[in-house]
Amino acid sequence: MQRQKCEIYSRVVGFLTPISQWNKGKKEEFKDRRTYDKILDQNN
């Protein structure tokens, strides 16, 4: 089985854009991002 290149998209200001089109600075910023899962309060 051969590997295939996978395009990664990110949502920026409501628009999905492929990160391959970003400049070097934006790509570095993307690597530094952290993701969070929203925890819902079950008492509401």
Image: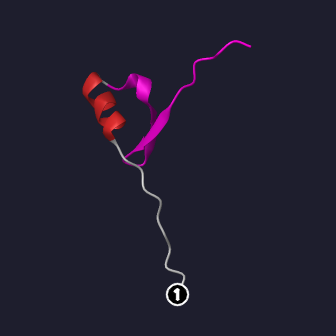
**Picture quadrant of residue 5:** top right
Query: Local crowd at mark 1 within 10 Å, few (<14), some, or many (≥20)?
Result: few
Position of residue 39 in the picture relative to residue 22 (left or right): right
Residue 14 lies, in percent from the top left, at 42, 49
User: What segment carries the magenta color?
Assistant: 1-22
Q: Is residue 42 left or right of residue 32?
A: right
Can you give x and y, in whole percent of width and height, for residue 43 in the image? 52, 87
Q: Residue at x 34, y 43 (%)?
A: 33
Residue 42 placement: quadrant: bottom right
Residue 21 located within the stretch drawn in magenta = yes
* Residue 4 screen position, x and y as percent: 63, 17
Q: Is residue 4 magenta?
A: yes
Please tell me whether residue 13 is drawn above or below residue 30 in the rendered image.
Answer: below
Direction from residue 21 to residue 24 in the image, left or right: left
Which quarter shows the N terminus? top right
Query: Residue at the top extreme?
Result: 2
Q: Residue at x 65, y 15 (%)?
A: 3
Count of marks, rendered view: 1
Residue farthest bottom in this picture: 43
Q: What is the three-letter code of the residue carrying label 1? A: Asn
Q: Is residue 9 above or below residue 4?
A: below
| Secondary structure beneath label 1 | loop
Residue at figure coordinates x 30%, y 24% from the top left: 23
Which residue carries the number 1 mark?
43
Describe the colour scheme in one phrase: secondary structure
Hey, which residue is sitting farthest left in the picture? 25
The relative height of residue 9 versus residue 12 in the rendered view (above or below) is above
Q: Looking at the picture, does residue 37 appear above or below residue 2?
A: below
